[in-house]
C-alpha cells in the first residue's frame, strides 16, 4: 500500500517536471508581435507634429506603438546604447531619445559607426515616460540610410521589407465589419473558402508558395471569421474566448493545443497564439494560429501553415492592416 | 504523523499544480458539429502550380474580381492581365456575381459583360437555385458566350 502510494507520488512529480520542461522550452511564436512587429514608417518632422500638436490624444494613440522613424543623428551616448534623433530638414528643435532594447544590444556596433548628422532609420516601440514627461523610442533596429522621405502609409518589418498600404488591395469580411489589405500579388493566389467549397468559415486562403511560382511546397495563410452564433452549440460559451479558440484548433487538427501565448496587439486588444502541427499522411507542417476576438460575437482567425515561412514578412505586414469594428 | 501530514499536503499541491499546467481549468466549448471548419485536406496540397485549392482556378483567380484597393474593375484594363475565373452562384431566385447579388438576369448579364475579358472562365454553380431562375441565368450566359465567342471549355456548369 505504502509502496504504491510512493509510486504514485513519484509519477506525479516526474510528470510535473516534464510539463514544466515543455512550458519552458516552448518556442516563441513566429509572428509574435513583441519580437517581430510591423513598424509604421514616419518622418521625424511628421512624428513631432503627431506627438506634440495634441499631447493628450497622442498619449492615447501612439503610446506603445511600433514606428520606423526616419531622422538625423543629433547626439550619441558615450556608452553607445542610445542616440537622439531630430529633423532631417533641421526644421524642428525637438529631439527624440532612442535607447537600444535589451534584445538589440548587438546593434551597438551600428551606433559606434554613426556620426552626428547621419540619416538613420530607427525601428522601435514608442513610449511616453510620464516621470520625465517625454517620449522615447525603445530601439529594436537601427540602420544608416540615404532615404530622405518616409510615407506614413508605409509599414516595415525588421528585415527591411516595406509595403505601402496604398499599393495594397482591400478585402472585407462580415459585411465590412472586418477589413484588411493584401499585397497585389496575393490576389493571384486567393481562394474564397465558402465560394470554392474549402470550408464553412467566411474568409480567404492565400497559397503563398504559388506567388511567382516560387515553390510547390505548400505555404498558406488563412484569414477568416468564426461567428459564435453560427458555430457554437451553446450561446453561453461566447464569452469563453480561449475555450472557443481551443475548440476551433481541435476541430481542424484533432487535438487540444493547450494554453495560448498572449500578446497585446497594435489596437489594444490581445492576440492569442497557438503553435501546432498539421500532419496529413507522411507530411508535417507548422500550423500557427492567431486569434483576436471581435467582442463576444466572434473571432478573427489567422492560420499560417508552412514548412518554410518564406512570406513571414508579408504575413506580419498584412496582420498590421486588419481592422475591425471593435478597434 | 506529522510527516504523513506534510506528505499529503505535498501530494495535494502537486496534483493541483498538474491540473493547472494541463489546463483543466478551462471549460471545454462544444462546436455545433464535428464537421471541419476548413477542409485542410483540400486546401493544402503539394501540387503543381495552379492546382491548389479549386482546380478550376489556375493562377490568375481573383474570386472577388476586385481591382486595386477594392475598387471594381472598369473593364478597360490595358497591358497583360491574368486570366480570371468568375463564379456565378445561383441560390433561390438570386445570383451572386462579383460580390453583388442580382435578381434581374439582365442586370447580371450587364455586370458580367463589364468584367469579362478574353480567356476568363465563368463557372455557374447551382446552390439550391429555383429551377426556372437557374434556367434563365444559364440561357443568358449562353447568349453572352455566343456574342463574346467564348470557348466551350471556359463556361462551366458546376
Image: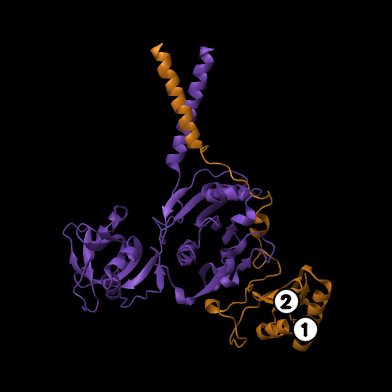
**The residue positioned farthest toward the top in the image shown:** B1
Q: Residue B155 bears which disc, if any?
A: none
Density class for disc 1 (Cα within 10 Å; few <14, some 14-19, many ≥20) is some
Task: Return the x and y of residue B113 as percentages of the image width and height.
Answer: 70, 85
Q: Which residue is mark 2?
A: B122
Picture colour for chain B: orange
Residue B46 seen in render = no
Q: Locate residue B93, reporting x and y percent.
A: 76, 73
Disc 1 vs disc 2: Cβ atoms closer than 8 Å?
Answer: yes
Find residue A290 and report its horizontal and vertical position in percent.
51, 55
- B137 lies left or right of A153: right
Q: Tag 1, which chain?
A: B
Q: Position of residue A307 (x, y in %)?
A: 55, 55
Place residue A95 in its image quadrant. bottom left
Q: Looking at this view, is A143 or B99 the one in front?
A: B99
Specify whether A97 is left or right of B150.
left
Position of the N terminus of chain A, as image quadrant, is top right
Image quadrant containing the C terminus of chain A: bottom left
Amino acid at each position: 500500500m505504502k509502496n504504491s502510494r510512493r509510486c504514485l507520488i513519484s509519477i506525479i512529480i516526474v510528470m510535473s517536471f516534464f510539463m514544466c520542461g515543455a512550458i519552458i522550452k516552448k518556442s516563441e511564436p513566429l509572428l509574435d508581435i513583441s519580437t517581430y512587429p510591423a513598424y509604421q514608417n514616419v518622418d521625424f518632422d511628421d512624428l513631432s507634429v503627431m506627438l506634440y500638436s495634441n499631447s493628450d490624444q497622442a498619449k492615447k494613440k501612439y503610446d506603445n506603438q511600433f514606428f520606423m522613424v526616419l531622422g538625423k543623428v543629433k547626439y550619441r551616448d558615450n556608452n553607445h546604447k542610445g542616440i537622439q534623433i531630430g529633423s532631417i530638414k533641421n526644421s524642428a528643435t525637438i529631439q527624440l531619445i532612442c535607447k537600444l532594447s535589451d534584445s538589440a544590444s548587438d546593434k551597438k556596433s551600428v551606433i559606434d559607426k554613426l556620426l552626428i548628422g547621419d540619416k538613420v532609420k530607427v525601428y522601435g516601440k514608442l513610449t511616453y515616460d510620464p516621470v520625465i514627461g517625454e517620449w522615447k523610442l525603445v530601439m529594436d533596429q537601427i540602420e544608416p540610410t540615404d532615404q530622405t522621405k518616409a510615407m506614413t502609409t508605409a509599414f516595415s518589418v525588421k528585415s527591411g521589407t516595406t509595403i505601402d498600404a496604398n499599393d495594397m488591395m482591400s478585402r472585407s469580411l462580415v459585411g465590412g465589419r472586418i477589413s484588411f489589405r493584401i499585397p497585389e500579388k496575393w490576389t493571384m493566389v486567393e481562394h474564397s473558402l465558402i465560394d470554392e467549397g474549402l470550408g464553412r468559415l467566411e474568409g480567404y486562403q492565400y497559397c503563398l508558395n504559388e506567388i511567382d511560382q516560387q515553390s510547390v511546397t505548400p505555404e498558406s495563410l488563412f484569414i477568416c471569421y468564426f461567428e459564435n452564433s453560427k458555430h457554437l452549440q451553446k450561446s453561453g460559451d461566447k464569452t469563453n474566448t480561449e475555450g472557443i479558440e481551443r475548440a476551433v484548433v481541435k476541430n481542424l487538427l484533432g487535438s487540444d493545443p493547450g494554453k495560448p501565448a498572449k500578446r497585446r496587439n497594435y489596437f489594444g486588444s490581445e492576440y492569442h497564439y497557438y503553435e501546432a502541427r498539421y500532419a496529413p499522411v507522411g507530411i508535417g507542417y507548422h500550423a500557427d494560429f492567431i486569434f483576436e476576438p471581435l467582442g463576444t460575437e466572434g473571432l478573427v482567425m489567422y492560420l499560417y501553415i508552412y514548412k518554410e515561412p518564406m512570406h513571414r514578412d508579408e504575413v506580419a505586414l498584412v496582420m498590421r492592416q486588419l481592422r475591425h469594428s471593435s478597434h | 504523523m506529522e510527516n504523513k501530514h506534510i506528505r499529503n499536503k505535498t501530494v495535494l499541491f502537486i496534483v493541483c499544480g498538474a491540473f493547472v499546467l494541463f489546463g483543466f481549468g478551462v471549460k471545454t466549448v462544444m462546436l455545433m458539429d464535428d464537421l471541419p471548419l476548413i477542409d485542410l485536406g483540400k486546401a493544402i496540397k503539394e501540387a503543381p502550380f495552379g492546382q491548389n485549392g479549386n482546380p478550376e482556378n489556375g493562377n490568375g483567380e481573383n474570386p472577388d474580381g476586385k481591382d486595386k484597393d477594392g475598387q471594381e474593375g472598369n473593364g478597360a484594363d490595358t497591358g497583360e492581365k491574368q486570366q480570371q475565373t468568375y463564379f456565378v452562384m445561383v441560390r433561390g431566385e438570386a445570383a451572386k456575381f462579383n460580390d453583388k447579388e442580382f435578381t434581374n438576369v439582365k442586370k447580371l448579364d450587364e455586370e458580367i459583360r463589364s468584367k469579362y475579358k478574353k480567356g476568363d472562365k465563368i463557372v455557374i454553380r447551382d446552390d439550391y437555385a429555383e429551377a426556372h431562375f437557374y434556367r434563365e441565368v444559364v440561357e443568358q450566359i449562353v447568349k453572352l458566350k455566343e456574342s463574346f465567342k467564348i470557348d466551350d471549355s471556359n463556361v462551366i456548369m458546376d
